[in-house]
Every structure is written in C-alpha cells, then in structure tokens.
Amino acid sequence: MLKVLVCVSGGGTNLQAIIDSIGNRKIKNAKIVRVISNNHNAFALKRAENAGIDAVCVSPKDYPDREAFNDALLSAINEKEPDLIVLAGFLVVLPEKIINEYKNRIINIHPSLIPSFCGKGFYGLKVHEEALKKGVKVTGATVHYVDEGTDTGKIILQKAVNVEEDDTPETLQRRVMEQAEWELLPQAINMIANK
Ligand code: GAR
C-alpha cells in the first residue's frame, strides 16, 4: 500500500479528486496518510477532515524564520514516512532539503502544458491569464516529478484542453481542472502505486 502525503494551499479540488478516486478504486493500493496545508484557511483542510484524513497546518506565519518553517514542514512529512508526496496546488517552493530527502518521490500538478506557462510566478489563475494573453488555442495540465527547479522535473502525464473564444481566466481554469487535472493526478498516483 503506497503511503501518500498530500500538500495543499487552497480549495483542494485536486485533493478531493484523489480522495474520490481512492474511494471508487480508480486509485488502487494507495492511501492518504496526511494532508499538510501552509494556510490555516484552506478549504482543503476541511475536505481532509470530512474524509477522516489526518490534516495539519504548517504555516510560515507560525515560525520566526524560513528555516524554522522548513524544518517544521520536513518534520510533519517525516512523521508519516510517506512513499510519495503529492503537491496538489501547494504554493510553497519546497526547500532543497526536502527535495533531496524525497528524490523521485515528489510529484506536482501544474495547470498548463509544460514547458509553456510555467516556472517562477506561474501558479493558479495567473497561468490561465497568461495563456489567454498569448492567445493559445490549446492548453492543458501536466503532472511531473519535482526537482530543484520550478516545474523542471521529469514529465509523467499531460493532457490538452481547448481554449474557447469567450474564455475568462476563471472559465479556462475550471475547464482545465475538469477535463485534465482531476483525471491526471489520480491517474499518475495509480501508476506509481501499481508499477
Ligand atoms: C490547481 O489548478 C493546480 O494545478 C494549481 O493550483 C490549483 C489548485 O487548485 N497549481 C499550480 O499552479 C502550481 N504551480 P485546488 O486547490 O482546487 O486543487
């Protein structure tokens, strides 16, 4: 049984997709051992609690400096000895210490077709704003391993999604989630759990 730890920052719809996919056995041989949020107000924490999953908040606001926060984050991860860390809308740049300790065991979902609209500063709605500004006709989502760079690790899965004429960043974000993210992230976890 693959022990999965999920890191979140906001609404947690990707977390919900993982919870549901474990429930309906689209993901086999995996369980979520903990959800960590960096944000006390993240609705994702509620989703975890509702599903009876251990959920903790490790917020930079509760620590005197970045190093203390990084240490607390690593401890909260290590306590559960996860086989896989899933960044599901986690808007914290992981410290090198964690990346090194969990090499090839951290995956991230990004709401574009990498290498487009990724890297520093590209997260959440911003990604879709930039895609619309550029006028691309196709965008999508990517699941990739996490390395020291930002969105530079080995790609695991990608799925394309059409951009519509009258899209706003919000409508595009929703379509990318519905048609790509909520499908890809559970699929990637299932692949890793059953390889
Ligand atoms: C998702 O669209 C995810 O791809 C994105 O944040 C959103 C979180 O939504 N992640 C990034 O932009 C990472 N660079 P959620 O909390 O509802 O899953």
Image (cartoon, helix red, strand yellow):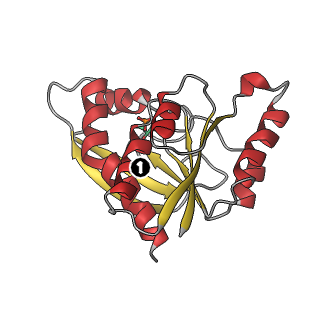
Q: Decide which of 62, 176 is in the foreground and name it.
A: 62
Hey, which residue is sitting farthest left in the picture? Answer: 165
x 44%, y 30%: residue:
11
- The answer to which quarter of the image holds residue 100 is bottom right
69 horizontally vs 33: left or right: right
Give coordinates of residue 175: x percent, y percent.
24, 37
46 horizontally vs 171: left or right: right
Tell me if residue 113 can be seen: no
User: What residue is disc 1 on?
Assistant: 19
Give coordinates of residue 49: x percent, y percent.
51, 37
As drawn, 165 above or below 157: above
Give coordinates of residue 152: x percent, y percent.
55, 53
7 horizontally vs 77: left or right: left
Hey, which residue is sitting farthest bottom in the picture? Answer: 195
Tell me if residue 115 can be seen: yes
- The answer to which quarter of the image holds residue 80 is bottom right
As drawn, 130 above or below 187: above
| Label 1: which secondary element | helix
Give coordinates of residue 18: x percent, y percent.
41, 51
Instruction: Using a 10 Å C-alpha cutoff, classify the residue at mark 1 as few (fewer than 14 neighbours), some (14 to 19) or many (20 or more).
Output: many
Q: Decide which of 60, 132 is in the foreground and name it.
A: 60
Ligand 1 closer than 8 Å to label 1 CB:
no
Could you tell me the amino acid type at mark 1? Ile
x 36%, y 26%: residue:
129
Q: Decide which of 92, 32 is in the foreground and name it.
A: 32
As drawn, 182 above or below 173: below
Tell me the quadrant of ligand 1: top left
